[in-house]
Amino acid sequence: MINKNFFFKGYRSIFTHDSPAIALTCCFIAIGALFKNLGFNIQESIFSTVLTYALPGSLVMAESMLIGASLLNIFLAVWFVNARLYPMAVSLFPLMMHKSQPKWKYYFSCHFIAVSAWLIMKSNYKKIPKEHRIDYWIGIGSATVSVSVIGTFIGFSFSEYLNKDMMMGLAILNPVYFLCMMVGASKTIPVTLSVLLGTILGPIIYLFSPEWSILLAGVMGGTIAYLVGEHSVS
Amino acid sequence: MSANIVYAILVTSLATFLSRFLGALTSEGIKETSKLFKWFNCLAYATLAALIARTIIFPAGVLVDASYSSRFVVVLLSLVVFFISKKNFVYPTIFSAICMAILNNYI
């Protein structure tokens, strides 16, 4: 089963000095308040946070529901927005694959793929023996989901006390936190270039194709960065 | 629970899980030293950077009402705080929320 030592080691990563706990809690406070304004009850709000556990996807669902979109439209819109989770999974799971571990752990724990957990794992995986990385990852994922649920609960419960300025403060916090984490992770040429090109291309492509902007910017920026990285090595 | 809301949540979670599961499934044949893995690593970082930049420049939700200049100033100052605090993630994060609330209230 799951190795408790590594699971709790992963779980405790949420309490470190560079933890995403504050950013994550604040974002889900905003999501909790948004859910309440949309007419969700507390069970539905928490149900949504646990099952979806991806901020952009939850936002798209909320916006789609506001304009009365069909379930198929919601599915496609969320799938587009969250397609970024595919390359994130492919660039993380090979680091955790070990023949001694059962496959269900990988299929179950892929649910924890989200920016915060992904970035924590990416910066810490080398400190963990490969055999136990999956348990460590499940610990990180459980911790970030717990924090998200607490944030949703707080946001839902105190939504009437959150004015527009406070909501704006909560909304900017998440991109700033992720931006700092990305800048902090930019230690090699390919990663630095990927971050730079993604940042530049994302908004430019958005002007022509809002739906495809993230994916196209990711593929174009990432491929150029990869080729430059390979060229600099050779 | 309202049936419509539950269906919307289920559809959203299914659409989200699909990308994650396909990613985990295809990872099985990829070695961490392979070129394919390195390429996907670059794709992931570039995609995330694009998402963050889009969230700041073309936001959805309440951030739409904040001016471009206030968003730009908050992000720039937060990055300064990030470097001054020796790459601590918590200080710039808290700073950004307070700074945005103040800027939006007074400017």
Image (cartoon, rainbow, N blue to C red):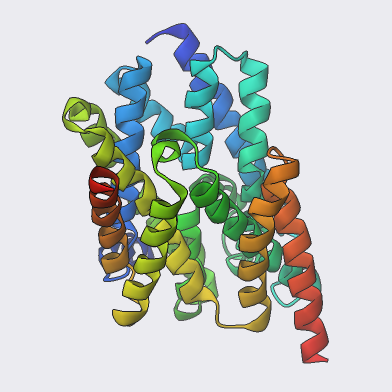
Q: On the rendered structure, is A106 left or right of B5?
A: right
Q: Position of residue A220 (x, y in %)?
A: 78, 60
Q: On the rendered structure, is B62 left or right of A205?
A: left
A102 or A80: nearer the viewer: A80
Is residue B96 depicted above or below B18 in this figure?
below
B43 or A204: nearer the viewer: A204
For the question of whether residue B106 can be seen, the reply is yes
Q: Position of residue B73 (x, y in %)?
A: 39, 61
| Quadrant in which the N terminus of chain A appears | bottom left
Residue furthest front as drawn: B107
| Quadrant in which the C terminus of chain A appears | bottom right
Residue drawn at the location 37% of the way across and 44% of the way down = A171
Residue drawn at the location 62% of the way across and 64% of the way down = B45
Task: Count all numbered tags in the image, as a single digit.
Answer: 0
Q: Position of residue B50 (x, y in %)?
A: 62, 55
Q: On the rendered structure, is A18 left or right of A116?
A: left
Q: Position of residue B14 (x, y in %)?
A: 59, 30
Residue drawn at the location 68% of the way across and 28% of the way down = A76
Residue drawn at the location 62% of the way across and 45% of the way down = B20
For the question of whether residue A149 can be seen, the reply is no
Residue furthest bottom as drawn: A234
Is residue A110 depicted above or below A151 in this figure?
below
Specify the quadrant of the image occupied by residue A221: bottom right
